[in-house]
Image: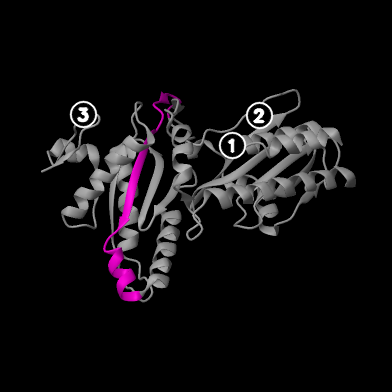
Amino acid sequence: MSRVADHLAELTGFRDRDALDATLVSALHDLLRPREIAIYRIVGEPEDRRWLTRARLTAGETVPSADALWADLATLPPLAAHPLRQACLQQREGMVVDGPPAQTLFPLDLERDCEAVIELHTERPLSTEQLRLAGSILRVYRNFHSLLDYSERDTLTGLLNRKTFDESFMRSTVPAPPVPDPATGLRRGGRNAWLGVVDIDHFKHVNDCHGHLIGDEVLLLLARLMRGVFRQGDLLYRFGGEEFVVLMRCDDAIAAGAAFERLRTAVEHHAFPRVGRITVSVGFTAVRLSDTPSSAFERADQAVYFVKQSGRNRVEGHAALVTRGALVEAAIGDDVVLF
């Protein structure tokens, strides 16, 4: 019992979700001694969904391994390659399959869409007592995950909130290592981190004319559109009011601008109840090695301000504005001049 208590204490001692998944895998590996245990999460676009390994331990290993969040989707196994995982998520309950090796699968997300599964390979099927132990630890994991969601997410939209931005910025924007090109086998540069600021145009007019309840509905629908446009690994924040922030990885400014343009177009063509059409202004910037959270945000915000001052409903990159002479990038501590 003391080993179980120790693992539960360690499991609830982290606020980092990556560490939480690794700790869960380590705890169940120590208590159940499987051949292999891993957490898999679904990533990718609806038409090409893949399995990303969040944490994996095999017999003899002591430290869990994982796929990089910026892994090339083409290198990950497709959903259809693992029908048992799909069945587990669809049924929303644990599954036991006789071996050898025996497989035991549990869905991890029960309050939201089921997008992750934990899978164990054992010499023989788990006993009733072992299944009960695993179920109890998973309940603690899910409950702690819910507490993290409550503290880290905006209560209206469900997106990450402002206070989590600084905490996750450094971890999410460290330079990605080179990854192998699936077509050539050659290693190419890792994807760069990009930060975008999304601002709803004339949102005060929405609140003044239709009331704050309708305004809240617009915010909810925009958050839903953002989830549909951006990828699983992209971080989406609501900073408050009508301002949203995106942290993501892309190959270059063209790819980043295209992602934000997809959002702008999706919003422009969406019919918002009672309001009709709304638009958004977007500014984005590459995250630099020397950046702090505030310096990267400031550049993207300056690009948004430029868009707001020159017609709205557009996407602009900070570097492109500087190149065109529309912005002058000042030294650190100085203000940026708009021409």
Can you tell which mark lies on residue 229? Answer: none
Please, what secondary structure does the residue beneath circle 1 have? helix
Residue 81 image-quadrant placement: top right
Check disc 3 and report the residue beneath it: 331
Q: Identify the amino acid type marked 1.
A: Asp
Q: How many marks?
A: 3
Looking at the image, tell me whether mark 3 or mark 2 is earlier in sequence order: 2
Check disc 2 and report the residue beneath it: 64
Looking at the image, tell me whether mark 1 or mark 2 is earlier in sequence order: 1
Q: Quadrant of the C terminus?
A: top left
Residue furthest toward the front? 333
- Residue for point 41% across, 41% down: 248
Residue 316 appears in view: no
Disc 3 packing (10 Å; few <14; some 14–19; many ≥20): few
- Is 128 positioned to the left or the right of 334 in the image? right
Check disc 1 and report the residue beneath it: 18
Picture coordinates of residue 263, whole percent (x, y)? 35, 55
Instruction: Between label 3 and label 2, give the one nearer the viewer.
Output: 3
Disc 3 and disc 2 in contact, CB within 8 angstroms: no
What is the CA distance from the residue labelled 3 to the residue labelled 2? Answer: 43 Å
Please, what secondary structure does the residue beneath circle 3 have? loop
Instruction: Read off the magenta span.
Output: 184-210
- Is 328 positioned to the left or the right of 290 in the image? left
- Residue for point 85% across, 34% down: 2
What is the CA distance from the residue labelled 1 to the residue labelled 2? Answer: 11 Å
